[in-house]
């Protein structure tokens, strides 16, 4: 299995992809005194599909916002390899977060528009991205005419239209029904395999994180911290057959055990979750 | 499949009752107010006849209509004067209200500092301010405009400010992530997001600017300085010309209704594709 994976991705001499971002001893304390993150060390390599898995309050969304540059760390530092600016970051929120008054096309065009790209110049990129997320023909629809899954596709297309090097996703499919979620999981993987960008995917679903990721980082709460890491050594492409395979079940089991330990590690310090 | 569709076409009693109800409501929506209005006018006419009320106290509707026709030249030229003030002040209220709201939206500090002034202007009765304006401002049109503007601009300012500040937090982050400038954020995010709020304010301001214009004319007209509909009403009042008084009153009412309908239509046309308020309800 590992052999197959290595064969697919270009690697450095050490057998690993080059480092894209490392978080070193990162901490975040909010002004109300809550410690959201404490001493987080995390290495993200080019081409990783990394999931941050953890219970609510473990700071996984905070970590994502730090990486996006929407928030600054109280302590520690983030080291990007080479020069990366916000243009190289795509972000998908928990809700589709579309402009309700704008058409699907205009929503996907938005990041380019903000960079001064005209409608005509942006058209090829927008059209291509829409076909990649299977939304060709819906260019002129407005968000309220779309289903939840389709709105999320628009949101992904918008994040990817600038061809970012890293895609940050904050529980993007949490509000969708299971069938739609499976479909979007498959399509996201397909997109990732074609383009080989780096993904940091925040989720509280063991099954989703194992299905998608090459690495699962389990986080614990109070204070938010990295609890453990689990490499998912299953080959891509992963499809519906993988979803029902014993390998997948075993990996889910492993991840679930780590997660339970992570939750128990905080059980002593909190009473009712609030 | 066809069997199912066939039975689906035959509505059960509950659904057919609902369909009938909806049909009735659609007709009733305009037929009912119209019928009541006609009834009220007929009753008005009958009361005049039965009680032999003299024309200078309460004219019969027919006489009012006759006056509206006979005095059309006088009344409509006055209406034009009033309309000019109304629309100019509404235009200024839009420019002033939106302009101030955008200014307020630039910084919480600006809003905190200056919003109270807007409230003071709003809560002080315009009739009480007018004597001051009369002293400070010489130009008749400017005087009236200022009055109508003070009455009309507040709902636009207040609503637009609320709208500019109620942008989805994630959308704000998205713009930040994409390096949007302050201007881009205003142009592509905050102004469109504020549109439904602004249009709500505009609907209120439309009526208020007419009220403001008429009230200002009233105060100015009492000093013999105005030629708008309000001065026609005062004049008619002095001469006990009740039919003309009623005719002028009806013109003002109709104008107010028309302004409201037009602004509602504009609002609907702008919002119909995306905003909840403009969507048809479905069961």
Image: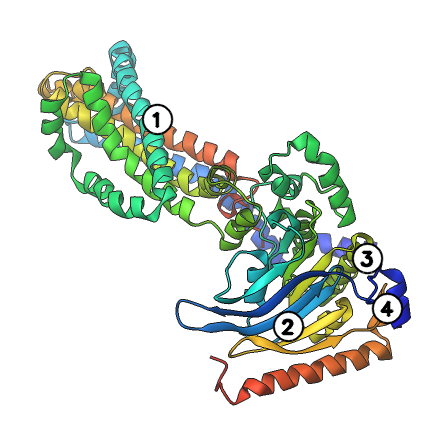
How many C-alpha atoms fall within 10 Å of the one at disc 3: few (<14), some, or many (≥20)?
Answer: some
Callout 3 secondary element:
helix
User: Looking at the picture, do discs 4 and 3 lie on one chain?
Assistant: yes
Q: Nearer the viewer, mark 4 or mark 2?
A: 4
Q: Position of residue B26 (x, y in %)?
A: 51, 42
Horizontal side of residue B237 vs A233, given as left or right: left
Q: Going by the picture, which residue comes out furthest to the front?
A: A13
| Gap in angstroms between the C-alphas marked 1 and 3 | 56 Å
Q: Position of residue B240 (x, y in %)?
A: 11, 20
Read off the residue under disc 4.
Answer: A235
The answer to which quarter of the image holds residue A130 is top right
Residue situated in front as seen by the camera: B1 or B19: B1
Horizontal side of residue A115 vs B27, given as left or right: right
Q: Residue at x 52, y 34 (%)?
A: B269
Read off the residue under disc 3.
Answer: A193
- Label number found at residue A204: 2
Q: Nearer the viewer, mark 1 or mark 4?
A: 4
Callout 1 secondary element:
helix
Horizontal side of residue B248 vs B106, given as left or right: left
Residue situated in front as seen by the camera: B252 or A166: A166
| Gap in angstroms between the C-alphas marked 1 and 4 | 65 Å
Q: Are marks 4 and 2 in contact (CB under 8 Å)?
A: no
The answer to which quarter of the image holds residue A172 is bottom right
Query: Going from the N terminus, do you reach mark 2 or mark 3 first?
Result: 3
Q: Are marks 2 and 3 in contact (CB under 8 Å)?
A: no
User: Looking at the picture, do discs 1 and 4 lie on one chain?
Assistant: no
- Label number found at residue B231: none
């Amino acid at each position: 299995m590992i052999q197959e994976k290595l064969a697919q991705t270009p690697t450095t001499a050490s057998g690993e992809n080059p480092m894209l971002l490392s978080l070193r001893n990162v901490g975040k304390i909010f002004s109300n005194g809550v410690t959201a993150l404490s001493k987080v060390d995390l290495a993200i390599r080019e081409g990783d599909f990394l999931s941050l898995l953890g219970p609510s309050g473990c700071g996984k969304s905070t970590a994502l916002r730090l990486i996006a540059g929407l928030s600054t760390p109280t302590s520690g530092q983030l080291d990007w390899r080479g020069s990366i600016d916000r243009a190289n970051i795509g972000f998908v929120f928990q809700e589709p977060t579309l402009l309700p008054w704008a058409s699907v096309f205009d929503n996907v065009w938005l990041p380019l528009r903000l960079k001064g790209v005209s409608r005509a110049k942006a058209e090829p990129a927008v059209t291509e991205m829409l076909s990649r997320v299977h939304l060709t023909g819906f260019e002129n629809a407005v968000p309220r005419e779309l289903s939840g899954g389709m709105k999320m596709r628009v949101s992904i297309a918008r994040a990817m239209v600038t061809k970012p090097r890293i895609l940050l996703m904050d529980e993007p499919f949490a509000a969708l029904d299971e069938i739609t979620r499976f479909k979007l999981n498959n399509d996201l993987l397909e997109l990732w395999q074609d383009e080989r960008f780096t993904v940091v995917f925040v989720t509280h679903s063991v099954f989703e994180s194992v299905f998608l990721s090459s690495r699962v980082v389990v986080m614990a709460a109070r204070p938010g911290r990295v609890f453990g890491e689990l490499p998912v050594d299953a080959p891509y492409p992963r499809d519906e057959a993988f979803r029902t395979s014993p390998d997948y079940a075993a990996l889910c089991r492993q991840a679930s055990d780590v997660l339970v330990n992570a939750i128990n590690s905080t059980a002593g310090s909190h009473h009712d979750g609030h | 499949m066809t069997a199912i569709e066939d039975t689906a076409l035959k509505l059960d009693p509950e659904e057919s009752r609902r369909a009938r109800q909806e049909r009735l409501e659609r007709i009733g929506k305009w037929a009912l107010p119209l019928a009541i209005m006609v009834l009220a006018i007929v009753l008005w006419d009958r009361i005049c006849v039965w009680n032999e009320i003299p024309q200078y106290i309460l004219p019969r509707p027919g006489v009012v209509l006759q006056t509206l026709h006979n005095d059309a030249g006088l009344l409509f030229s006055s209406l034009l004067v009033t309309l000019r003030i109304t629309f100019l002040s509404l235009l200024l209220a839009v420019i002033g209200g939106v302009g101030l709201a955008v200014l307020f939206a630039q910084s919480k500090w600006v809003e905190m500092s200056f919003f109270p002034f807007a409230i003071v202007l709003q809560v002080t009765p315009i009739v009480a301010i007018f004597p001051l304006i009369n002293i400070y401002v010489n130009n008749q049109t400017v005087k009236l405009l200022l009055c109508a503007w003070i009455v009309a601009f507040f709902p636009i300012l207040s609503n637009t400010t609320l709208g500019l500040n109620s942008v989805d937090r994630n959308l704000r982050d998205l713009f930040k992530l994409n390096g949007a400038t302050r201007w881009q954020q205003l142009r592509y995010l905050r102004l469109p997001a504020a549109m439904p709020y602004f249009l709500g304010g505009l609907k209120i301001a439309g009526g208020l600017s007419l009220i403001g214009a008429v009230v200002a004319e009233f105060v100015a007209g009492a000093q013999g300085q105005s030629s708008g509909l309000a001065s026609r009403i005062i004049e008619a009042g002095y001469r006990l010309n009740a039919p003309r008084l009623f005719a002028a009153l009806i013109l003002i009412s109709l104008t107010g209704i028309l302004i409201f309908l037009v602004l509602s239509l504009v609002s609907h046309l702008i919002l119909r594709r995306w905003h909840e308020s403009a969507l048809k309800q479905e069961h």
